[in-house]
Amino acid sequence: MSNEKKLRSHDWFGKSDKMGFVHRSWFRTQGYPDDYFVNRPVIGICNTWSELTPCNGHLRDFAEVVKRGVLEAGGFPVEFPVTSLGETVMRPTSMLFRNLASMDTEESIRANPLDGVVLLTGCDKTTPSTLMGACSVDLPTIIVPGGPMLNGRFRGECIGSGSFNWMIKEKQGVENYTPEDIHEVETGVARSQGHCMTMGTASTMACMAESLGLTLPGAAAIPAVDARKKLMAQLSGRRIVEMVREGLKLSRILTRQAFENAIVVNSAIGGSTNFIIHLLAIAGRIGVPLALEDFDALGGKIPLLLNLKPSGSYLMEDFYYAGGLPVIIREMRSYLHNDALTVNGKSLGANCAVSPCYNTDVIAPLERPLQHEAGMAVLKGNLCEQGAVIKPSAASPHLLKHRGRAVVFESMEDYHARIDDPALEIDGSCVIVLKGVGPVGYPGMPEVGNVDLPMQLLQKGVKDMVRISDGRMSGTAGGTVVLHVSPESSVGGTLALVRDGDMIELDVAARRLHLDVPDEELAARKAQWMPPEPATTRGYVRLYIDHVQQAHLGADMDILRGGSGGEVRRDLH
Ligand code: FES
């Protein structure tokens, strides 16, 4: 093979010295014949399978399918596990461990004889964490998204996983759902393998990967249990071998244009606010300049085409049957860099040029969008000097311009202790302020920004209120929720200084979030402010607290930004 020298793995398996012997000999415990060690691209299948991450429970099988494709194309597949992040069970929040999983992925790729990588992903954080790690090594890389669950079903209705969680308090307290009712939902809402099937964060991440050009066309929306998902996995296995031979590294695909495309597409699909924090972190790893303000400037005025829960009516299964993401990309072509390169070696525009829509209720045409301006709004003001985020399409229109009295909770524990106290002085015009849920403060920036409303107001029929925090919000949730306030309260941002009774002004059209307290008074409060004790003094969490950056930078750790490439200077001696 003419490009023998180009294979990174040759440095391990191609040598005739003692270490070449060692590298090959121990691999032979798995029964590989001689020809596996000669000029075959070694493809690492980075698997986030775990029974503790139910959304990724099928990826063990998928790895075998990817291996078929790698072998067919003349590659040498080797599967390896990395830290898997299960959204629904990890405490205090899976986000605390996104950067840890990225470190695991990065070092696992770099330290081993790999020429290319397939990332098997699914549940929310498993896509950004592995992609961040892969970016810091920058080998040829392809993503196989694990796919959404089938539609949830309850008494003849389609229901979305994740989204129902946010209704349970209201269902129990106002609509008198019994434990049997809740059990029936519980068994019908997550009824197949796959990740959440609303346009929550997992679906958003799959669409992000496809719009960045990192999956084969159409991969994002295929349900996990559809045979065509396995077909996509097998074809991805074949393709990664070709990518190695072509030298098609991540950095050739992940250009500034690719990131701009992803922002436009995310607005058109009504993707999760978590998209912002993860895309910023990914851009930081691959070295593409991207700022919080870009999300508003590039995506703020993009029309909404996709009618999916939580803000719409349908689910990912319906999206796939309607034609999937290629339809959105074709419809949005006038907003996109259509010549952006993708993993199949063709441009994004060429991949999606012929992508018919089979259901315009699910995917609206560009000339008749569901909303005219659907992207995220980035707010600025004295309450968020480095920015905050709101998703207007998930908010109540009458609250997008609002002035209200602050009702302040100093922590999640404080919120839980007092929110349903009948003596709490609160009405529907108040602004709920939640502190201590940022990257440093919680730690890990949990998805709690969309806190439930107090029962006393739910029972009066109040459906939404302005809520402000330094935390995040699940992509499956909605409401007039201001998130990612930066700097966060625990590092002394103005949010830390808000007191009960202060007046707060939100004006989304003007992109303004203002605490109506005189500067001198804020200065006096700041002088009295004491930073909280760190949540721990040791281990990874201490490392995280010491190095995590604020939300407007993507909440990556400062020591992880950028990359170190694939070279390892010291040999195994
Ligand atoms: Fe895994 Fe929603 S809990 S994707």
Image (cartoon, rainbow, N blue to C red):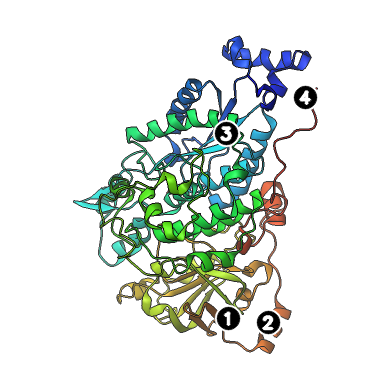
Real-space Cα separation, disc 3 to disc 2, in angstroms: 52 Å
Relative side of 29 to 369, left or right: right
> Quick check: 420 left or right of 8?
left
Location of mark 3 (residue) = 117
Q: Which percent across, then down, holds residue 544?
A: 67, 52
Residue with the mark numbered 2: 525
Identify the image quadrant of residue 514: bottom right
What residue is drawn where x is 30% and y is 73%?
Answer: 459
Are the residues flagged by discs 2 and 1 in contact, CB closer than 8 Å?
yes
Q: Which residue is mark 1?
A: 499
Whether residues under marks 2 and 4 lie with C-beta atoms below 8 angstroms apart, the answer is: no
Identify the residue at the far left of this view.
Answer: 156
Q: Residue at x 35, y 51 (%)?
A: 327
Q: Where does label 4 land, which residue?
A: 572
The residue positioned 56% from the left and 37% from the top of the image is 141
Q: Given contact means CB atoms under 8 Å apart, are the residues at marks 3 and 2 in contact?
A: no
Task: List x then y, in percent, for residue 454.
Answer: 40, 72
Give the residue displayed 37% in from the left and 63% down from the top.
304
Please name the amino acid that badge 3 sits on: Val
Decide: few, some or many residues near mark 2? Use Cα within 10 Å; few <14, some 14-19, many ≥20. some
Q: Amino acid at mark 1?
A: Arg
Which numbered disc, 3 or 2, marks the residue that appears first in the sequence?
A: 3
In front of the other: label 3 or label 4?
Answer: 3
Residue type, mark 2 in image: Arg
Residue 315, given in percent of the width and then of the height, sits at 31, 52
Q: Position of residue 25 (x, y in %)?
A: 67, 12
